[in-house]
Image (cartoon, helix red, strand yellow):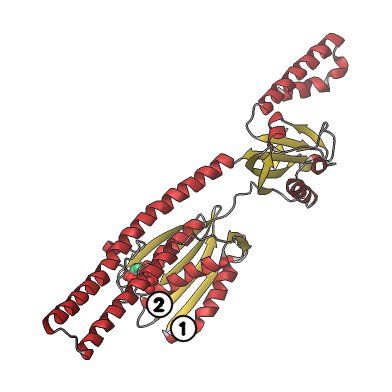
């Protein structure tokens, strides 16, 4: 249809008044259709010209973001938005001529709290910028669904943990019970308890109580809500700082570090403290898997959607059978292991929206791959061709 109008425009001098009237009628109909389509969208659309004046907004946008009263069209866009955070973001993004920026906002309109996702893209025609397009979507329901899902996931892992605790406390409780019975028997038989004997029993009781305490402390650590503080961070920096921190310990264990960090990775929203803890738990396991020393290899890389962190060791590896169990709470092959190290790692990576993958060959070594999502800013420019 646009091509038809362009052709007609070229021949406008030769057209009669009736033909021009028909042309205008068609144009109006097409324009109306376009507006109806844009007005029926569930997302808000706002378009500005090169002077940052609002030249179009669909009906939905009025329900999603608050405007100052009066007709917002023809005004500078950030001056008509009645929300300081959104207006500030729009102004900054447009004035800094960012290629594409997006952000989440929580706003309260008429007593209803909404989470909005806003992205701004320049509109480009024949290589030059014609203005900007703001796209607003209401992600309130999606966010609620996500957190419901996470809660359900947490609940499920809590059940496994609780079953684990129940299993773990059985032994020390059994042992406490037996030793109390032994003491009662002695008292019944001899009407007294020798100091040495009593001392031995009490020592055992004490040890078992300590064991119970450790189990509870570890359990609480694993189930405690994480409350991460997400901040934009450079993952390579986080890894380098951590490796610096464990350098001497690794040296002592005859483990050499081999590092291949890809430069120019995008910054990610992470909780540095938790991320370091997750990586540290993996490093500790790797060192324990290399009792005679070896190589710990750290690598970062990216593709379109993820940053990958590879952590490889040249240790004893994990058997096929154990591979399925190592993230389970309380699974350990170590004499003094809690078996919660990797459970915590898993929890932290999930909290960051990521994934962790395990590969291992017995006698050769183990590789953990952590995939962390890169926020998807639609960097494509809207381009009108023709
Ligand atoms: N890099 C590795 N190489 C070989 N085995 C591993 C490696 N990482 C983990 N494992 C196996 O997975 C098990 C579970 O690890 P996890 O970190 O959860 O607990 P743990 O290390 O046994 O105890 P804790 O971390 O509390 O000291 C370990 O006992 C070990 O058998
Ligand atoms: Mg461990």
Q: Helix, strand, or loop for circle 1?
A: helix
Residue 179 lies in quadrant: bottom left
In the rendered image, which residue does mark 1 sit on? 249
Which badge, 1 or 2, is on the more N-terminal residue? Answer: 1
Q: State yes or no: discs 1 and 2 in contact (Cβ < 8 Å).
A: yes
**Residue 140: x, y in percent?**
59, 41
The quarter of the picture where the C terminus appears is top right
Q: Work out whether residue 379 or residue 41 is closer to the camera in this orientation and state it.
A: 41
In the rendered image, which residue does mark 2 sit on? 287
Q: How many marks?
A: 2
**Residue 8: x, y in percent?**
79, 19
Q: Is residue 281 left or right of residue 181?
A: right
Q: Quadrant of ligand 1?
A: bottom left
Q: Is residue 13 left or right of residue 381?
A: right
Residue 2 lies in quadrant: top right
Q: Helix, strand, or loop for circle 2?
A: helix
The residue positioned 29% from the left and 62% from the top of the image is 166
The quarter of the picture where the N terminus appears is top right
**Residue 286: x, y in percent?**
40, 74
**Residue 215: x, y in percent?**
35, 69
Q: Which mark is residue 231?
A: none
């Amino acid at each position: 249809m646009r091509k038809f109008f362009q052709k007609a425009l070229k021949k406008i001098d030769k057209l009669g008044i009736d033909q021009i009237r028909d042309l205008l009628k068609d144009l109006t109909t097409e324009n109306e259709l376009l507006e109806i389509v844009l007005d029926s969208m569930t997302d808000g659309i706002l378009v500005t010209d090169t002077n940052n004046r609002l030249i179009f907004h669909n009906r939905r946008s009025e329900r999603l973001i608050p405007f100052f009263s009066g007709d917002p069209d023809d005004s500078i866009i950030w001056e008509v938005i009645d929300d300081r955070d959104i207006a500030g973001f729009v102004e900054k993004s447009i004035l800094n001529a960012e290629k594409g920026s997006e952000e989440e906002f929580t706003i309260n309109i008429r007593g209803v709290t909404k989470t909005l996702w806003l992205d701004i893209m320049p509109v480009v025609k024949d290589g030059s910028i014609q203005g900007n397009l703001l796209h607003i979507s209401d992600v309130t329901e999606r966010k609620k669904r996500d957190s419901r899902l996470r809660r359900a996931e947490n609940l499920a892992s809590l059940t496994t943990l609780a079953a684990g605790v129940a299993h773990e406390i059985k032994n020390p409780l059994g042992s406490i019970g037996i030793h109390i019975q032994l003491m009662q028997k002695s008292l019944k038989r001899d009407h007294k308890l020798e100091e040495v004997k009593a001392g031995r029993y009490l020592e055992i009781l004490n040890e078992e109580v300590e064991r119970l305490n450790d189990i509870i402390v570890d359990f609480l650590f694993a189930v405690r809500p994480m409350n991460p503080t997400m901040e934009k961070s450079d993952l390579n920096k986080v890894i380098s700082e951590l490796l610096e921190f464990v350098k001497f310990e690794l040296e002592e264990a005859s483990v050499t570090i081999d590092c291949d960090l890809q430069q120019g990775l995008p910054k990610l929203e992470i909780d540095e403290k938790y991320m370091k803890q997750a990586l540290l738990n993996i490093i500790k396991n790797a060192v324990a898997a290399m009792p005679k020393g070896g190589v710990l290899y750290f690598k970062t890389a990216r593709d379109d959607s993820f940053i990958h962190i590879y952590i490889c060791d040249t240790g004893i590896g994990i058997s096929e059978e154990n591979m399925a169990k190592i993230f389970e709470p309380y699974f350990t092959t170590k004499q003094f292991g809690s078996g919660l190290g990797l459970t915590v790692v898993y929890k932290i990576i999930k909290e960051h929206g990521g994934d962790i993958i395990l590969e291992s060959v017995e006698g050769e070594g183990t590789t953990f791959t952590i995939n962390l999502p890169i926020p998807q800013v639609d960097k494509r420019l809207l381009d009108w061709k023709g």
